[in-house]
């Protein structure tokens, strides 16, 4: 998931470029409506507007490829990139790198800040769900990620700071380990203690071994 | 006057394009809130316009150059009032760009 960089930050990088290509990406950044085709069009119009305000005529063109993290798609930008003085990539941190490598002569500028691996929890709200730790524990944690969702990234259970199922850093934040424990309890029935020592000393009889 | 099926069709790029193509301001006229045939198109249009109003100063453009209004198709007098107000506002703001509009920019 990503967010648009402040316009001034992008504009400062354009310097005196006159032909600007804004390249959107149809992947993850389109899902969070930060870097898709529509956002590329908006930014291109914004760049023209910003230029016009200074009395400069800027040609800002918008385009988008399905994924900027794949060389084949990036290659389809070749002609447009060759005609541009600067390329603003609305890919994520991965996506920006591919055109930058594919077109060594081009000035490729990131238009977004890539923030986390997450998803849409409700329209317009995106939340972190993966911290890219490289060692997935979801099989043991009932599908709820403690690495990305616990503020302390704890690996072995509640810290004791939560109250009413809410994290101590914010009452808006559910305690990931509380969620994990509740969900695991639903999967795993309570232990059967009837076979334990509660019936007094235990005895095993094996009649086939009797003499 | 650009007609769209619903004000919910209006996206920021369209409004910016209108400014780039020579308009000094853009007014989005949506149906009355609660009366949207597509349920919430006009509410979404308002949110988009408001977001764009926050974005415009970053480009050096006054936020008042885009505005959202709600009125029904039967409110001709009100429409005239709103257009007059918007025109007066834009007259006070003046042209948004420093130099004259150049031919190549408007595609003439």
Image (spheres, grey):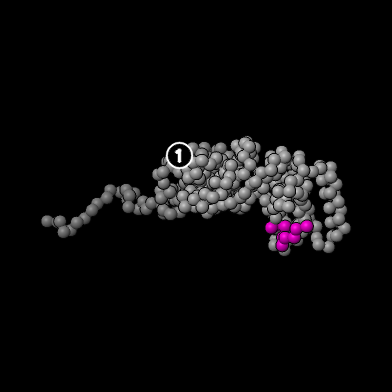
- Read off the chain for label 1: A
Of residue A93 and residue A119, the one placed in the foreground of this image is A93
For the point 77% across and 52% down, which residue is it? Answer: B27
Magenta part mainly helix, strand or loop?
A: loop
Q: Position of residue A116 (x, y in %)?
A: 52, 43
Relative to residue B60, is residue A93 drawn left or right? left
Q: Secondary structure at mark 1?
A: loop
The number of numbered discs placed on residues in the rendered structure image is 1
Asked whether the viewer can see residue B3, the reply is yes
Residue drawn 23% across and 53% down? A204
Identity of the residue drawn at 63% across and 42% down: A18
- Residue drawn at 47 percent across, 39 percent down: A153
| Image: B35 above or below A36 | below
Q: Is residue A6 visible?
A: no
Which quarter of the rendering shows the C terminus of chain A? bottom left
User: From the viewer's perspective, is A191 left or right of A11?
Assistant: left
Q: Is residue B5 magenta?
A: yes
Q: Residue furthest left?
A: A211
User: According to the image, label 1 marks what residue?
Assistant: A154
| Image x and y of residue B65, in percent | 77, 46
For residue A205, side relative to residue B2 (left or right): left
Badge 1: few (under 14), some or many (20 or more) residues near its Cα, within 10 Å? some
Give the x, y percent position of residue A44. Answer: 64, 47
Instruction: State which region is magenta.
Output: B1-9
Q: Position of residue A39 (x, y in %)?
A: 62, 49
Instruction: Pick the residue in front: A202 or A159.
Output: A159
Q: Is residue A168 magenta?
A: no
């Amino acid at each position: 998931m990503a967010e648009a960089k402040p316009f001034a930050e992008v504009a400062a990088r354009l310097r005196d470029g006159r032909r600007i290509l804004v390249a959107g990406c149809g992947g993850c950044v389109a899902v969070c409506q930060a870097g898709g085709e529509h956002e590329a069009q908006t930014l291109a119009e914004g760049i023209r507007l910003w230029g016009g305000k200074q009395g400069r005529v800027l040609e800002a063109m918008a385009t988008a490829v399905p994924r900027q993290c794949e060389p084949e798609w990036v290659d389809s930008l070749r002609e447009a990139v060759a005609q541009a003085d600067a390329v603003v990539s609305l890919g994520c941190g991965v996506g920006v790198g591919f055109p930058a490598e594919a077109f060594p002569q081009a000035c490729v500028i990131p238009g977004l800040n890539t923030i986390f691996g997450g998803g849409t929890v409700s329209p317009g709200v995106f939340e972190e769900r993966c911290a890219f730790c490289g060692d997935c524990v979801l099989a043991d944690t009932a599908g709820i990620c403690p690495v990305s969702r616990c503020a302390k990234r704890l690996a072995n259970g509640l810290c004791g700071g939560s109250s009413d199922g809410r994290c101590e850093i914010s009452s808006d934040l559910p305690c990931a380990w509380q969620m994990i424990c509740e969900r695991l309890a639903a999967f795993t029935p309570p232990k059967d203690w009837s076979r334990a020592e509660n019936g007094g000393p235990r005895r095993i009889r094996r009649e086939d071994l009797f003499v | 006057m650009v007609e769209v099926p619903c004000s919910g069709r209006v996206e920021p790029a369209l409004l910016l394009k209108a400014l780039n193509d020579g308009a000094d301001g853009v007014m989005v006229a949506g149906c009355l809130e609660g009366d949207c045939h597509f349920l919430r198109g006009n509410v979404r249009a308002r949110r988009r316009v408001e977001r764009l109003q926050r974005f415009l100063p970053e480009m050096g453009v006054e936020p008042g150059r885009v505005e959202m209004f709600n009125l029904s198709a039967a409110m001709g007098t009100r429409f005239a009032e709103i257009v007059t107000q918007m025109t007066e506002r834009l007259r006070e703001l003046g042209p948004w760009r420093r130099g004259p509009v150049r031919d190549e920019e408007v595609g003439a």
